[in-house]
Image (spheres, helix red, strand yellow):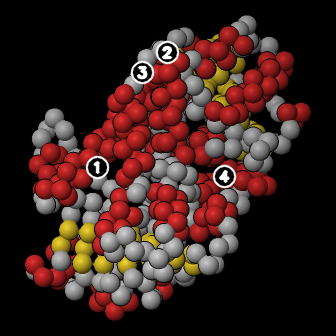
Amino acid sequence: MRVLVHGSELTAATAAAALSWVGHQVQWLPHASAPWSQLQRTDWLKREPYLLNQIEESQREGTLRLVEEDSELDQPEVLWLSLSPAQRNAADSLLKTVMSMHPGGLVLINNSTFPVGETERLATLAEGVAMGSVALPDMLEEGRAWEIFTRPGRWLLGCDEDLAEKVTRELLRAFNRRSEVFQRMPRRAAELTKLAINGMLATRISYMNEIAGLADSLEVDVEHVRQGMGADSRIGFEYLYPGCGFGGPNFSRDLMRLADVQSASGRHSALLEQVLDINEQKKETLFRKLWAHFQGDLNGRTIAIWGAAFKPGTARIDHAPVLTLLKALWAQGAKVQLHDPAAIPALLEEVGERSDLVTFSRDPYQACEGADVLMLVTEWKLYWNPDWQRLAGHLKEKLVLDGRNIYDPRYVASCGLQYRGIGRRADPSII
């Protein structure tokens, strides 16, 4: 099929790479805010497995053509939109351009993070030209985009026309050979389902964080509670891990979109507000533990931080807990020595060069030299099995604050360190 992909989001890059990989003739028009000359240098695209290599290979094979201007477009059979909420005008503009060159038979696939109901609005705009419109919510995760697109567990197919469904199934047929992954429903239902899924996942995380706080107060190891809850078949273990708060551009944005949908419908969601509030509070958890340890005297302390990205496998820091943590530490006169294998450029762009407040280290152990305490904020794999004896020699206070509960408290304590996690703790004296 002849496919036109529009956008500079991860979804656009993945769709362009994957669809061209399986033989479709793809034109990719990045959004004007991030043309290809800029996009190909971004850290997130370079770090995404397979993606950049496949884009370059498809260009060599001739199945993918990068387009910079509307005037360069050939007539597509499918228009695939992968835009951010702020780029809705770009969708309108491109749709009008494509309609002017198309005699009929176009299928519109909206893979954008637009508000609920936007696919219907675009369908009205394309009336008389489009055979149908499909809401295909973005289900990708950074670091696993290629895997999820090419080996999907499911697609939410928001579609009201049988012909549009047929075209979409054919477009994605190469990725649907092992099992039936399409779940068809009305367009608005698909858009709301995506938001509802992320709302439920966020609720589980926030609830588990609340239980971890209670476990701390009662001197209970929250890991016992988590194991007991997860073993219940009605609950399971997914997204049942306490931590120091979640972030990210898509997860956080979807929660705000869900809140906006609630507000626009005239319904107040106390639950969603609580989920968002709990998450923001949990971003301060490590700081509060540090404050308690030093009895409020943080001035002149040096804090080592491992991890800045909002999750492992990405260079992004959108809404990341580290941003809240840095502000709190700096406000109390503490200095930070930070290591992250990917997110330093993004953090520099966000906070600027502040050598009096933060030093960026070449390796994890360098960040700990001369530090009082170590805080684990992002659970990159290179942090999972450190040299504890070496750390004990570096950290003046022999204190590890584990914001992701990735370490064994008793083992850390057996190495002569104090351990404080989220709802977990251990001291050398009790081993």
* Dot placed on the residue nearer the N-terminal end, 2 or 1: 1
Q: Residue furthest right?
A: 71
| CA gap, disc 2 and disc 1 | 29 Å
Give, as a three-letter code, the residue at label 1. Asn
Point out residue 164 in the picture as x, y percentages from the top left corner. 57, 17
Give, as a three-letter code, the residue at label 3. His
Q: Disc 3 on helix, strand or loop? A: loop
Residue 394 visible? The answer is: yes
| CA gap, disc 4 and disc 3 | 44 Å
As drawn, 168 above or below 42: above
Point out residue 183 in the picture as x, y percentages from the top left corner. 40, 24
Q: Mark 3 points at which residue?
A: 268
* Dot placed on the residue nearer the N-terminal end, 1 or 3: 1
**Horizontal side of residue 399 vs 352, given as left or right:** left
* Residue 178 figure quarter: top left
| CA gap, disc 2 and disc 3 | 9 Å
Q: Quadrant of the N terminus?
A: top right
Labelled pair 2, 1 in contact (Cβ < 8 Å): no
Residue 265 marker: 2
| CA gap, disc 2 and disc 4 | 41 Å
Q: Name the residue under label 1.
A: 209
Point out residue 167 in the picture as x, y percentages from the top left corner. 58, 21
* Dot placed on the residue nearer the N-terminal end, 2 or 4: 4
